[in-house]
Amino acid sequence: MIVDSRVLREDFVPSEVRHRHDEVSHLSETLEPLLCDEPPETAFLFGPTGVGKTCIARYTLAALREQRPDVRVAYVNCWQEYTRYRVLYRVLEALERAFDVHGSTPTADLFDRLARADERPIVVVLDEADQLEETEVLYDFHRLRHVSPVLIANREEELFAHFDDRVRSRLRAGTRVYLERYRADELVAILEERVRQGLEPGVVDEPQLRAVADAAAGDARVAIGTLRTAARLSSQRGRERITDEVLETAIPDTRAAIRRETIEGLIEHQRVLYELITDAGEIAPRDLYDAYETRVDEPKTTRTLRNYLTKMVHYDLIEARGRKRGRTYRVLEDDAV
DNA sequence: ATTCCACCGGAATAGCGGGATA
DNA sequence: TATCCCGCTATTCCGGTGGAAT
């Protein structure tokens, strides 16, 4: 059934991007100065999850490197690398200049290394840039002529909100590319392409792809994930093709699986909080803190809990209603995406 | 309308673990 | 081996404020 499973993977970059031609050319025009050794403006990609931000960044940079192979690209996911140190480390790693960096190497040394790297241009893609906790690294990149950042985030206001003034004013000028959610027919076209490359002919029909696209609500990541789940389930059950019945389980399974993975990524104390909120349905901060303290042997301070909670809000696991006094926490249901 | 205070979240700091160094 | 130095997490301290209480 499955001919090429890479095609169904999340990080697969297609050889041709569908329905994003304007956005791709906007981004490549922005980066064009690199072709004549000029520093480009900072580029921004904005849009909700699953609209192809990461995909067009990778695609565009791969195309750029075909014209200028000496341009180097460092890809950093700021969910994992959110400190100045870690971002710089990742970039050096991409340049193969991190081999002798160790735990006690100061951050300033990493910056110096990057500054004294050769003059070949470096494009740094900062995915999920709104998760960055130390934004001065953006100032670092701005100071270096040979480093050009590409920032990817969901919403422009949120990204700029936690920049300090220095960074904000530097990045005000910059090219912004906005991506809209896919329409259902666009998702169907994307799925058809993946099916053609990844699955045997005739295992899934057009109405089925339409059903997957509708359930994904404009999110290509969910749509492709659903297709992958359905194909796996079908071959496990020894079927020749994807049946409607398999599809019906695959659709909710995909969202549930994403959620489960997120919860598994939490640390124990965060999971306790999540359970308490789930049990209560809706809970006030004071009650939540009290319940937590009786549940756990060595409770963290409330300040730490607030850090955990804001993290969980970012993960879309829970929702905070109200701002200051009178706030309540509740679990975020899947349909609220 | 005014006061009050529960709660959030920024900034500075302490303590920890781990790798390098002497 | 002991010591130094690093970044990271959790903690302490606290200012600001939205909504409840009066």
Image (cartoon, coloured by chain):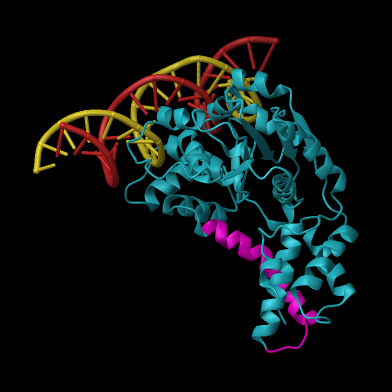
Chain colours: A cyan, B red, C yellow
Q: Is residue A109 above or below residue A246?
A: above
Q: Is residue A326 above or below residue A67?
A: above
x, y (%) of residue A299? 36, 45
In the rendered structure, the answer to whether residue A327 lies left or right of residue B21 reads: right
Magenta stretch contains residue A67: no
In depth, the one of A216 and A38 nearer the eye is A38
In the rendered structure, the answer to whether residue A284 lies left or right of residue A295 reads: right
In depth, the one of A144 and A164 nearer the eye is A144
Picture quarter containing residue A76?
top right
In the rendered structure, the answer to whether residue A34 lies left or right of residue A306 reads: right
Where is the N terminus of chain A found, in terms of image quarters?
bottom right
x, y (%) of residue A258? 62, 61
Q: Residue at x 45, y 27 (%)?
A: A112
Q: Which residues are magenta?
A: A238-263
x, y (%) of residue A324? 59, 30
In the rendered structure, the answer to whether residue A193 lies left or right of residue A49 reads: right
Q: Residue at x 76, y 58 (%)?
A: A220
Picture quarter containing residue A169?
top right
Q: Is there any visible trace of residue A61 in the rendered image?
A: yes
Q: Is there any visible trace of residue A251 in the rendered image?
A: no
Q: Is residue A277 above or below residue A165?
A: below
In depth, the one of A173 and A216 nearer the eye is A173
User: How many discs mark residues in the rendered view?
Assistant: 0
Report the predominant secondary structure element of the magenta stretch: helix
x, y (%) of residue A95? 52, 42
Q: Is residue A240 above or below residue A284?
A: below
Q: Residue at x 84, y 82 (%)?
A: A202
Magenta stretch contains residue A247: yes
